[in-house]
Image (cartoon, rainbow, N blue to C red):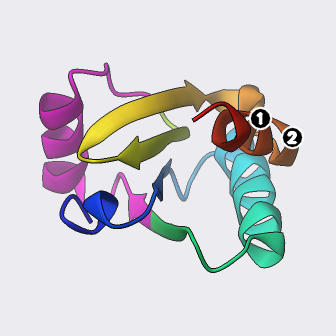
Amino acid sequence: MWEESTEKPVLLFKHSTTCPISAGAFKEYNAFLDSAEDNLDGYMVKVIESRDISNEIADKTSVKHESPQIFLIKDKEVLWNTSHSKITVDAIKDALNQS
């Protein structure tokens, strides 16, 4: 994913499979991806099932772990991130338009 971000922007979603807030954010994330063009790839990490990867993302990005959480990454840098109910189709679109 990090290498791919040098070719095109990447969305990374950290999802808690036991959290209703995360379920709502995951729906927003998927709704965005369903309407997105091919110039963007999306990835998802299940934070409970893949705690080591979730922790590595926090270390690599220097962004405190939250769940749900979303990142826009380009050229191996975090351009934008947010969490919880701020994860919406419109917020993702705005972040991409500003990058």
Q: Nearer the viewer, residue 34 or 95?
A: 95
**Residue 49 left/right relative to 92:** left
The C terminus: image quadrant: top right
Q: Which mark is residue 94?
A: 1
Residue 2 place in picture, x, y as percent: 21, 58
The N terminus: image quadrant: bottom left
Residue positioned 72% across, 47% down in the render: 25
Which amino acid, mark 1?
Answer: Asp
Residue 43 place in picture, x, y as percent: 44, 67
Mark 1 near mark 2, Cβ–Cβ under 8 Å?
A: yes
Which amino acid, mark 2?
Answer: Asp
Q: Determine if residue 92 is in view.
A: yes
Residue 33 place in picture, x, y as percent: 71, 70
**Disc 1 or disc 2, which is closer to the eye?**
1
Instruction: Say which element carries label 1.
Output: helix
Residue 34 place in picture, x, y as percent: 79, 77
Residue positioned 65% across, 46% down in the render: 22
Q: Which mark is residue 17?
A: none
Q: Nearer the viewer, residue 42 or 20?
A: 42
**Residue 31 left/right relative to 62:** right
- Which quadrant of the figure has residue 28? bottom right
Residue positioned 47% across, 41% down in the render: 71
Identify the residue position indicated by label 2 in the image: 90
Magenta-span inclusion, residue 18:
no
Question: Are there few (<14), some (14-19), or many (20+) residues within 10 Å of tag 2?
Answer: few
Question: Are there few (<14), some (14-19), or many (20+) residues within 10 Å of tag 1?
Answer: few
Q: Nearer the viewer, residue 82 or 77?
A: 77
Give the magenta-colored segment's residue range: 44-66
Residue positioned 33% across, 67% down in the render: 7
* Residue 74 higher or lower than 87, as above or below: below
